[in-house]
Structures are given as C-alpha cells and as structure tokens.
Image (cartoon, rainbow, N blue to C red):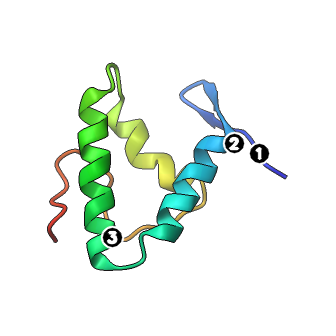
Amino acid sequence: MAVSLKLNGGMLPPKCCDGVKALNGMAKTTPDRQTACRCLQTAAKTIKGIKPNLAEGLPGKCGVSIPYKISTSTNCNK
C-alpha cells in the first residue's frame, strides 16, 4: 500500500517516492549514478521555486538510502 508522506506542511504524492525508488534501483553502477546525478542537477535548474533542503531530504523520506548528498553543488564525477 502506498503511503503519502508529510513534506513542508503538504502531502508528498506516493508516486513521487515510486520515482525515487525506481531511479535508485536503475542506477546501480557508478556511471549510471553519475548520469542520474547530472540529469537531476540539470532538471533542478529548470524548476522555479525548488527548495534545495527539501529535495535533499527526499530519499530519506521515501525510505531510500543513498551514499551521497542530493544537491546542485554535488560533484557528479566523484
């Protein structure tokens, strides 16, 4: 059963976490993760009003553990 999570006073749609989990499951190798990182950074620059601190916490709120910080300043080459 999908569960909505509270985020910044609103509800996080279950499909959002489905996307986070699917992307994490697909990006298994270092090159895959680097590509996903660059893609997310590019996409984040096109979203007006994005709140970096909330984006950073998204994996944890969805129960996904990743070994790096979600940030537009993350070095995707490492």
Q: Left or right of 76: which side holds 67?
A: right
Residue 34, picture quadrant:
bottom left
Considering only order in the chain, which callout, 3 or 1, is on the residue closer to the N terminus?
A: 1
Considering only order in the chain, which callout, 2 or 3, is on the residue closer to the N terminus?
A: 2
* Residue kind at label 2, given as amino acid type: Pro
- What crowding class fits label 1: few (fewer than 14 Cα within 10 Å), some (14-19), or many (20 or more)? few
Instruction: Write the residue at 24% across / 32% down.
Output: 45
Q: Which residue is tagged 2?
A: 14
Instruction: Write the residue at 30% across / 36% down.
Output: 44
**Spot occupied by residue 11 in the image (x, y as percentages of width and height):** 66, 29
Say which mark, if any, is on residue 32. Answer: 3
**Spot occupied by residue 36 in the image (x, y as percentages of width and height):** 33, 58
Q: Left or right of 58: which side holds 61?
A: right
Q: Nearer the viewer, residue 4 or 16?
A: 16
Q: Do tag 3 and tag 2 residues touch (Cβ < 8 Å)? A: no
Instruction: Write the residue at 59% across / 42% down.
Output: 16
Residue 74, picture quadrant:
bottom left
Q: Do tag 2 and tag 1 residues touch (Cβ < 8 Å)? A: yes
**Spot occupied by residue 66 in the image (x, y as percentages of width and height):** 42, 67
Q: Left or right of 35: which side holds 57?
A: right
Rendered-image quadrant of the C terminus = bottom left
* Residue kind at label 1, given as amino acid type: Val
Q: Disc 2 to disc 1, how far (Cα)?
A: 6 Å
**Nearer mark to the viewer, of 2 and 1:** 2
Instruction: Write the residue at 24% across / 41% down.
Output: 42
- Looking at the image, residue 68 lies above or below residue 57: below
- Looking at the image, residue 39 lies above or below residue 5: below
Q: Secondary structure at mark 2?
A: helix
Q: Which residue is tagged 1?
A: 3
